[in-house]
Amino acid sequence: MRLILVGPPGSGKGTQAKLLGERLGLTHIATGDILREAIRLRTPPGRKAKPYLKAGKLVPDGLVNDLVAQRFRRNDRPERFVMDGYPRTLAQAASFDQVLRQEFLDLSAVVLLAVGDEEILRRLGGRWSCPKTDCKATYHDPTKPPRTPGICDRCGTQLIQRDDDKPDTIRRRLEVYRRNTLELIPHYERQGLVREVAGEGDIEKIYNNIVQVVPRENGPC
Ligand code: AMP
């Protein structure tokens, strides 16, 4: 199974991609996480990307395309995966199409998570994340708070509100989504891959909505 999840920031892409990864054994590839890790490690791509993430803008296509292409050209490239946050522009979709073609990998579906703007603002305003790289648990005040306020249930680390989850940045990220990412839909519709799923309701219900629309697996891919 090879999936792309598309949805506005706060649509639950990350949560659903993680569940799909765990339950269906797919490699979860989140470009936001790859970029935040590169920033933390102060690598050259990390240094370039940092101001864009802080401002809630998309990093240049070339930079993120290179990071993804490198991941797919390694010996341990993912065979079965769920993409979370990539591609986000038409140019990225074109680059990813080419990488997949070269690697002889076909996509199974592009899942569009549909969530209204008001719901997005409500969700993202209360989002807290664990900054520890091997944990990255996310919480939400008031729907999924940690047991001890401000502390990660899993590893005890102090939770943070990501710069890009602050209100002004959220608004900018929504504009960016409408301007750039929605263009992906006609691109993948032409390939017959788009499946729209209601992204509101509880996490398990949304997960089931997704599993119902993606093709069943009957082989090793
Ligand atoms: P995310 O965690 O997916 O919400 O991404 C956080 C931030 O990382 C975004 O607001 C962008 O600045 C950057 N980013 C992540 N993925 C991409 C991408 N595919 N293209 C450009 N920028 C990205």
Image (tube, rainbow, N blue to C red):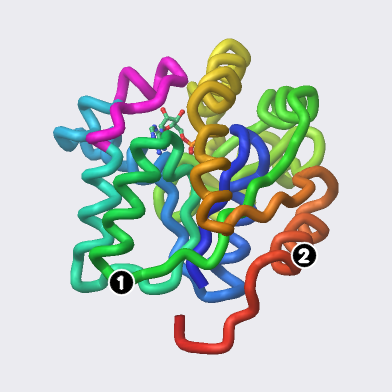
The C terminus: image quadrant: bottom left
Per the image, is 61 magenta?
A: yes
Q: Give the number of the mark in front: 2 or 1.
A: 1
- The verdict on label 2 being within 8 Å of ligand 1 is no
Residue 185, position as x, y percentages in the image: 57, 42
Residue sitting at x 32%, y 18%: 51
Amino acid type, residue under disc 2 in the picture: Asn
Residue 45, position as x, y percentages in the image: 20, 34
Instruction: Give me the disc on residue 148.
Output: none
Which image quadrant for residue 114?
A: top right
Residue 86, position as x, y percentages in the image: 43, 45
How far apart are labels 2 and 1 at the CA level? Answer: 29 Å
Name the element at disc 2: helix
- Figure check: 96 above or below 104: above
- The verdict on label 1 being within 8 Å of ligand 1 is no
Magenta span:
50-63
Q: Is residue 98 left or right of residue 128?
A: left
Residue bearing mark 1: 104
Residue sitting at x 58%, y 82%: 217
Q: Nearer the viewer, residue 195 or 171?
A: 195
Q: Nearer the viewer, residue 3 or 84?
A: 3
Residue sitting at x 57%, y 88%: 218
Amino acid type, residue under disc 1 in the picture: Phe
Residue bearing mark 2: 208
Residue sitting at x 64%, y 47%: 112
**Which numbered disc, 2 or 1, marks the residue that appears first in the sequence?**
1
Residue 41, position as x, y percentages in the image: 23, 39
Name the element at disc 1: loop
Ligand 1 lies in which image quarter?
A: top left
Residue ranking furthest to the left: 44
